[in-house]
Structures are given as structure tokens and as C-alpha cells.
Image (cartoon, helix red, strand yellow):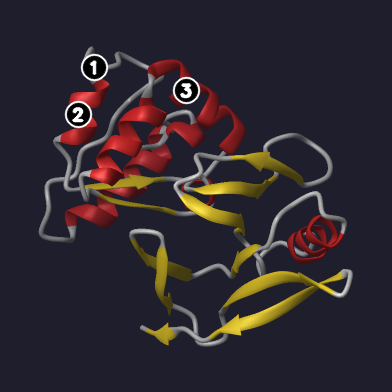
Amino acid sequence: MGTASGDDPTYLGRYYDAYRSLECEPSHLALFRRTPADVRGVLLASDVIHVGGGNTRSMLSVWRHWGIDAALREAWERGIILCGSSAGAICWFEEGLTDSVEGKLTRMECLGFLSGSACPHYDGERERRPSFHDLISSGKMGNGLAIDDGVALHFVDRELQGVVSAREQARAYRVDLRDGGAVETILQPFIL
């Protein structure tokens, strides 16, 4: 689903290039052109639903309008694999750190399938780490997980089962409020 990028043709092209190299039949659910009448049916017929990056706030607003938020919850409850990067990674949590609105990074409510908060691009964008720490330290955002670029978190149901990295130095972190400040705990990844 390329909703966060407005179904950008270049983004979709990269998606198809990547997935065609795997043993699968890639497809996408377009919401900014002709949208299938039964979006729920399209989602529930999938084995894996991958959500791309872009504007998280706009993506979630569009999803709520089309009822995709409810369809995704149903897909998750049926055991369909849900995954994504950037906006597609944080959308599954209760809250996420987003750059959807120009200016400072902000907290936003997400789908709530997974507990806590999430921050993508932790090492890729210099303002991510201090913003995430500030929001957690001030109590404006709950404890959560920070994800370096090239890192994936693997959940089974609601439990974190592992961390995988495509980059030698990339990590994920548990970030918790302790003694009035944000404290990081490194989650060691399996390096691909």
C-alpha cells in the first residue's frame, strides 16, 4: 500500500522491482486513482500487506475514510502478515513520531495494534533521537521503540520476537522514561 506517498508511481515502481525478484505475486491497493469497490476483500485476500513510507497523518486519514483501518485490524486478527517501513512501520503502534506536518517532529495517534510508541529513521535524521527523547521525557509520548534505518522489528502477535538489520552498525532501541529522562536500551539485531 503506497497510500503515504499518494500512490506515487516511482515509489510503486521500486516496490514492484523489489517484490518481483521474490517468489510472490505483488499487487497494490490504489486509493488515489480508481479504487476497488471492495477494499476489505482485497486486503483480506492478501498473504502479506506491506505499507510504504510517506505522510503518516494523511495515510491514516485516508484509511479511516475508506474503512481500511478496520480491515487491517481484521487482517491482523486473521494472521495476515502486516509490515512496512517508515510510516508503514509506525502506523501499527499506539503512537508514533512523525514529520507529517512541516516544522517540528510531532506525536500522533496511530492504529494501536502494538503497544507503545515508535520512531523510525532514528539514526538517519538528526532530529529524530532528541525529539523522541524530549517527548518521552516530558510525558507527552509513551515509552517505545526507536528504529535505525535498515532495521526491522519482528513481532508475533503483540510480542517483539527479534530485531534484524541490513546494516552492520544499525540497531533498534527500547526508549523508556526513567528518573525524569529518556533512557535507551540497545536491542541487538541479527545482521543479515
- Distance between the Cα atoms at labels 2 and 3? 16 Å
Label 2 sits on a secondary structure element that is helix
Does residue 61 sit above or below 27 in this rendering?
Answer: above
Does residue 137 sit above or below 162 in this rendering?
Answer: above
Query: At 16% from the left edge and 61% from the top edge, which residue is drawn?
Result: 22
User: Which quarter of the rendered picture does the C terminus lie within?
Assistant: bottom left
Q: What's the mark number on residue 64? A: 3
Check disc 2 and report the residue beneath it. Answer: 42
x%, y% of residue 78? 20, 44
- Distance between the Cα atoms at labels 1 and 2? 8 Å
Of callouts 1 and 2, which one flags the residue occurring earlier in the amino acid sequence?
1
The amino acid at mark 3 is Arg
Check disc 1 and report the residue beneath it. Answer: 36
Does residue 97 sit above or below 134 in this rendering?
Answer: above
Q: What's the mark number on residue 3? A: none
The amino acid at mark 1 is Pro
Given this view, does label 1 or label 3 mark the residue nearer the observer? 3
Of callouts 2 and 3, which one flags the residue occurring earlier in the amino acid sequence?
2
